[in-house]
Amino acid sequence: LFRSKEGKMVPLKTLGGVNGVANQITSWGAIVGYAENRKKDPGCPSPQIYQFKPVIWFEDWTLPLPTGSDAEGVASSINEWGQVVGASGSCAAFNAIFLYNFQPVHALLWQNGIATDLGTLGGVLNNFAEDINNRGEVVGGSDVSGDSTSHAFLWAPETKKMHDLGTVDNDYWSIAVGINDQGQIVGASANADFSIVRAFVRQNGKLVDLNSLIAGSTPLFLETACKINSSGEIDGVAFDPNTGYIHAYLAIPTP
């Protein structure tokens, strides 16, 4: 767990435990993520032992964020105003996609040290706020009623409610991972057995398969769109069926 300072890698302090993860940094140096403390959680499957809490690192401070009655939490994103989003929940089996032992239950927004529950799309599990822009708009994924699947959501500060963004075409599952200050949203959408996972960008109120917008040819199949900047440039993860390799990609909009 490190940050770069004056050309050197500087370790970030945990909450007394061994491990931690830094997820995002602002232009003024505030970093968010999560860190272990020294309290053992008997509900954690091996090799996870200790509780982990959402954290802000700034200068030499390590500031844990409240998680209410939930033992664990993760902070995923911070905007330039210091608003932080993520989730609280419980320890769970290792998630190979998100790389943590975590079951997110409550999608949260932290402001001035106070946690606000963003609600759900009807379900009680798998509610996670992934990104926040400088307008305070939040995106992520939330279970629908019955917890049969999750859909991408947009939470707006004006309405203070989650809006279900649906899926690409007739897909079964989706998650929104990034939003820029123009309100453009990117993420991933999948069919029922996850044999097809495809990156999306939201256009004119609909989730559009990013692969359908590629000009020219490419061997890559874009599986996830992770972030979108103010210029509309998108980065993410793609699969090359010719080699079987996974690649990072940058998608640049054309005029």
Image (cartoon, grey):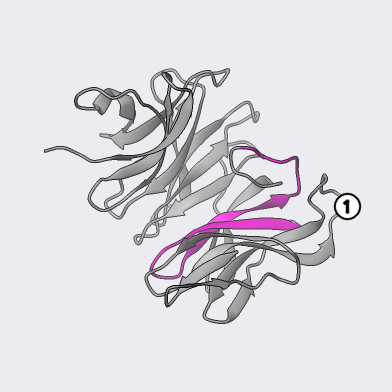
Of residues 105 and 164, the one nearer the viewer is 105
Of residues 244 and 144, the one nearer the viewer is 244
Q: Can you tell which quarter of the image residue 103 is in?
A: top right
Membership of 94 in magenta stretch: yes
Q: Secondary structure at mark 1?
A: loop
Q: Position of residue 21 (x, y in %)?
A: 60, 59
Label 1 sits on residue: 42
**Dot 1: within a 10 Å radius of its alpha carbon, few (fewer than 14), some, or many (20 or more) residues?**
few
- Magenta span: 71-96
State whether residue 50 is above or below residue 123: below
Is residue 158 visible to the viewer in this orientation of the structure?
Answer: yes
Q: Residue at x 77, y 59 (%)?
A: 51
Q: Residue at x 38, y 68 (%)?
A: 80
**Quarter the N terminus occupies:** bottom right
Q: Residue at x 45, y 70 (%)?
A: 82
**Quarter the C terminus occupies:** top left
Q: Is residue 238 left or right of residue 109?
A: left
Is residue 187 visible to the viewer in this orientation of the structure?
Answer: no
Q: Position of residue 251 (x, y in %)?
A: 28, 38
Q: Position of residue 204 (x, y in %)?
A: 25, 34
Q: Is residue 42 left or right of residue 190?
A: right
State whether residue 69 is above or below residue 204: below
Q: Is residue 93 left or right of residue 106?
A: right
**Which residue is most to the bottom?**
60
**Which residue is most to the right?**
42
**Which three-letter amino acid code belongs to the residue tagged 1?**
Pro
Membership of 159 in magenta stretch: no
Q: Position of residue 144 (x, y in %)?
A: 57, 32
Q: Residue at x 32, y 36 (%)?
A: 202
Q: Can you tell which quarter of the image residue 214 is in?
A: top left
Of residues 189 and 251, the one nearer the viewer is 251
